[in-house]
Image: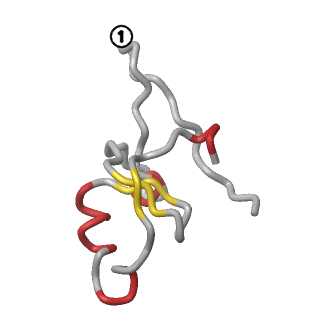
Amino acid sequence: MTTNRPIQTKEENSEEEIIWCDVCLKDDQKVEAIVYCHDCEENQCKECDSMHQMKKFRNHRRSDPKPIDTF
């Protein structure tokens, strides 16, 4: 499956790559991701993950966030 994912980037003056929430990036917001949903194929921040745990999506498989190049 090919998706148009935004490019993950390193923050200036940082040696560690920050993985951004894919949902927030669609709204031009940079929020650090805390979880990856395997079913939606998206990295999600704390707020998006909380909303995601509602009835319809609560059984989705989740793990640590993933950099773009591991999809």
Task: Name the outermost residue toward the bottom.
Answer: 55
Q: Quadrant of residue 69?
A: top right
Q: Residues within 10 Å of mark 1 (few under 14, many from 20)?
A: few
**Position of residue 4 measured from the top left corner of the image (x, y, whole percent):** 67, 54
Secondary structure type for disc 1: loop
Q: Amino acid at mark 1?
A: Asn
Question: Which of 65/18 is in front?
Answer: 65
Task: Name the outermost residue toward the right.
Answer: 2
**Position of residue 47 measured from the top left corner of the image (x, y, whole percent):** 24, 61
Relative to 36, 8 lies left or right: right
**Position of residue 68 measured from the top left corner of the image (x, y, whole percent):** 59, 41
Relative to 1, 58 lies left or right: left
**Position of residue 25 measured from the top left corner of the image (x, y, whole percent):** 45, 51
Question: Which of 9/64 is in front?
Answer: 64
Relative to 44, 71 lies left or right: right
Task: Count numbered badges in the picture.
Answer: 1
Question: At 53% from the left edge and 70% from the top edge, which residue is drawn?
Answer: 39
Give the answer, above or below, for where 1 lies relative to 70.
Answer: below
The residue under label 1 is 13
Give the answer, above or below, for where 59 lies relative to 21.
Answer: below
Where, quadrant-wise, is the N terminus in this rendering? bottom right
